[in-house]
Image: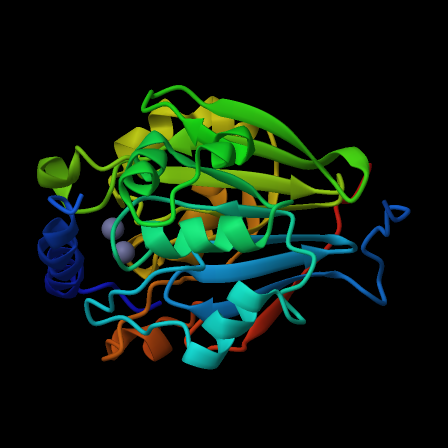
Amino acid sequence: MMKFPGSALRLATALCASTCALTLSAAPAALAHPSEDDPATAHFLANEAIMVSAGETRILFDPLFSVSYGYPLVAPEVRAAIMAGTPPYDGVDAVFVSHVHGDHFDAEAVNAYLAAHPDVILVGPWQARLDMQAAAGWDAAFEARIHALPFIASPQDLVLAADGVADAIRVETVHIPHAGGPGRAGIQNMAHRVTLNGAATVMHLGDATPEPAIYDTHSDHFAARTTQHAFPPYWVLGEWGGETTRARLNAQAVTGIHIPINQPDWLDASGEDFFTEAGETRPIPAHSHD
Ligand SMILES: [Zn+2]
Ligand SMILES: [Zn+2]
């Protein structure tokens, strides 16, 4: 297996760390379960933007951002379709934000999205709501639809209704520090583990650190539920390798995200799975119930 070059990791995290720092100052239909014919699916949009669909339930991770920092933006026509709610971006139930860096989150765009889609719930760090309140298009009426997660270490659980089902979306989120070391400690990066329709569990880690100690701290959280498909940033997958990543996250499959426009050579050689092209999908197998 390809060994991840440490210098490349430092370069990658330094790139995001230095560029991301720039944003700091800106500061009821019947439930259709996924089936073998229609499995839950992850759809890659760009950078760390993913849509996960499972039956009637659809969620978006980090879909609305406006700054590249060397990473691909969501294509303008895709962003327009998300904002307009045209297929396949119709019927979105919830939007998840990992953290407030500009390559993941645009507060004004999220405000506009919530205004245009009055049934959509937002789940994100407390810092996201602060930025939204300060951005154009804020409406106090959004408060009722925002789950702003406090900046605390312990895992936080939510149960969200969707499509007329009271517990269609189960959320188990934990703060995992941003990659880049103590200089990023002020950023509230959240790793969301989300179970759709009780059938498919996915995990989105934002810009999580590859430092193993924090994952050891939260080993009970990761052990508490098996994730069918996790989406760690590529530097985690590169540094740990697939086997260790799956074991540490208690995930059956992993696909790396946040791939730079200038893709590092080791990606292909590593043999690991990455979302590199917008429009790629991955099927998410249902839970086995035994
Ligand atoms: Zn970041
Ligand atoms: Zn990032």
- Quarter placement of the C terminus: top right
- Residue visible at 24% across and 76% down? 264
- Residue visible at 13% across and 61% down? 15
142 to the left or right of 283: left
Query: Quadrant holding ligand 2?
Result: bottom left
Residue 154 visible (yes or no): yes
Name which quarter of the figure residue 37 lies in: bottom right
| Residue 97 position within the rendered picture, expressed as x and y whole percent measured from the top left | 42, 45
Where is 37 relative to 209, above or below? below
Q: How is the image coloured?
A: rainbow
| Residue 143 position within the rendered picture, expressed as x and y whole percent measured from the top left | 48, 30
Q: Which of 144 and 172 is in front in this view?
A: 144
- Residue visible at 35% across and 30% down? 126
Q: Which residue lies furthest to the right in this view?
A: 30
- All told, the count of numbered labels is 0
Q: Which of 42 and 285 is in front in this view?
A: 42
Where is 19 relative to 194, above or below? below
- Residue visible at 27% across and 40% down? 134
108 to the left or right of 51: left
Name which quarter of the figure residue 3 lies in: bottom left
Residue 273 visible (yes or no): no
Where is 220 relative to 19, above or below? above
| Residue 252 position within the rendered picture, expressed as x and y whole percent measured from the top left | 59, 50
Q: Nearer the viewer, residue 173 or 132?
A: 132
| Residue 250 position within the rendered picture, expressed as x and y whole percent measured from the top left | 53, 40
52 to the left or right of 231: right
- Quarter placement of the N terminus: bottom left
